[in-house]
Amino acid sequence: MSKIPRSHVFCPSLCPGVKQALWLTKSKLIEGLPERIANLCYDPAYTFPNHEERVHNAISSACLWSTTGEIQEREEYCPKLLQGLLHLCRTQTCAFPSLSQRTFMENWKLATTWHKDSTIYHVRGTDGLLMSAKTPLETLASSSEIQATEQHVLDSLYPLSPAIDLQEVNVYEEKNDIGFKEGFPYSHPHTVYVTEPRDTKAKFLPDQLRAKMIMIAFGGAVAKAKILFGEDVKTLPQPIVVQSVGTDGQLFHFMVLQLNTLDFDTNDGIKNIVWMDGDQALYDTVAVKPKIKRKVVLVPAGIAGFKPETFMKFWAMYLNGAV
């Protein structure tokens, strides 16, 4: 009997750090949003009407209005806030008709595989809220920018194993399933919305949440590439772009991944690209009642330090591909 090969799988409960995720996905990190998306934040043509008041109300609805205690558990208010912000974005469909060419899938089911350094890696699991579209997102990095990634050197993880914290399993079947049935009209992954898992009390570190965003978006891009270009494709005829937004209910992280290559035989050559704009607070504090110590207000009641510019990045990510 032939020996069943061993492999390592990333699933929602296992979170490497960003440095590890970049190595696993052969990616170059660029800080900040891509120029095209950043421009949407400030272009008057795409201004979200009355967004400050409406976002403020969405935060209040998620964090304050439905509780009589100090504050709800983050497992409750985090998904409520995310859904509230997405609802605001959907209200703009009449102004931007192309937004109607989208749909949402809760608990997106994904399975894909790639080989790197004689090891098989998988992304498998059911997690996140996926917004998919009828058309793919446009390439963000030009051909010259893609070629320039050849000069980028991936950070070494030595003496740690690249597979540290990943689950080691026996491989019986290498699956490639993007979670869509054949003929599904919204077959292009657009944005994966990621929150912390509800089945654990351990709060993710921001670096872990950002790594999770990279791995899930990468998995979606790889699965789509294999469907479009074949299971054994290495040089992609066309890059594939997938976005991700992650939040713990206060901090937001915005990530865009452009899959340029599936050639993992070497760490040299063209790299994939990850743009990351992390640690963007939507507000500083939120409290039902003020926190007072020795007659000094430490935390005021209500929402303090509201930052509407963070929502504009959320809106720009949502709008990308529709204008």
Image (tube, grey):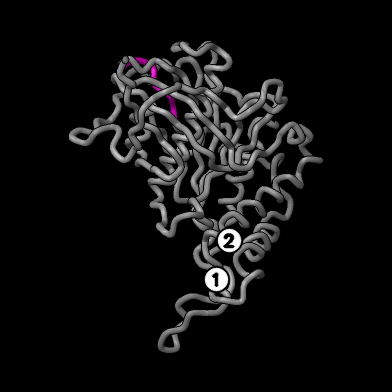
User: As displayed, is residue 118 above or below residue 215?
Assistant: above
Above or below for 146 versus 195 = above
Residue type at mark 1 is: Ile
Query: Where in the figure is residue 163, as x and y percent of width and height?
Result: 30, 33
Highlighted magenta segment, given as a residue range: 268-273
Residue placed at 72% from the left, 25% from the top? 185
Callouts 1 and 2 close, C-beta under 8 Å = yes
Are there few (<14), some (14-19), or many (20+) residues within 10 Å of tag 1? Answer: some
Q: The N terminus lies in which quarter of the figure?
A: top left
Say whether residue 53 is magenta: no
Name the N-terminal-most of marks 1 and 2.
1
**Residue at the location (36% across, 18% down)?**
264
Most extreme residue toward the bottom is: 295
In the image, 71: left or right of 161? Answer: right
The mark found on residue 71 in the picture is 1
- The residue tagged with tag 1: helix, strand or loop? loop
Residue assigned mark 2: 77
Q: Specify the amino acid type for callout 2.
A: Tyr
Whether residue 25 is situated above or below residue 225 in the rendered picture = below
Residue 27 visible at all: no
Residue 97: percent from the left, percent from the top? Answer: 79, 34
Q: Quarter-wise, where is residue 228 in the image?
A: top right
Q: Residues within 10 Å of mark 2 (few under 14, many from 20)?
A: many
Q: Depth check: 230 or 8 in front?
A: 8
Magenta span includes 271:
yes
Side of 212 where 61 appears, left or right: right
Along the line of sight, the residue nearer the viewer: 253 or 202 = 202
- State the image coordinates of residue 157 (x, y, percent, origin top left): 24, 33
Q: Where residue 37 appears, x then y in whole percent? A: 58, 35
Would you say 182 lies left or right of 237 here?
right
Q: Is residue 275 left or right of residue 44?
A: left
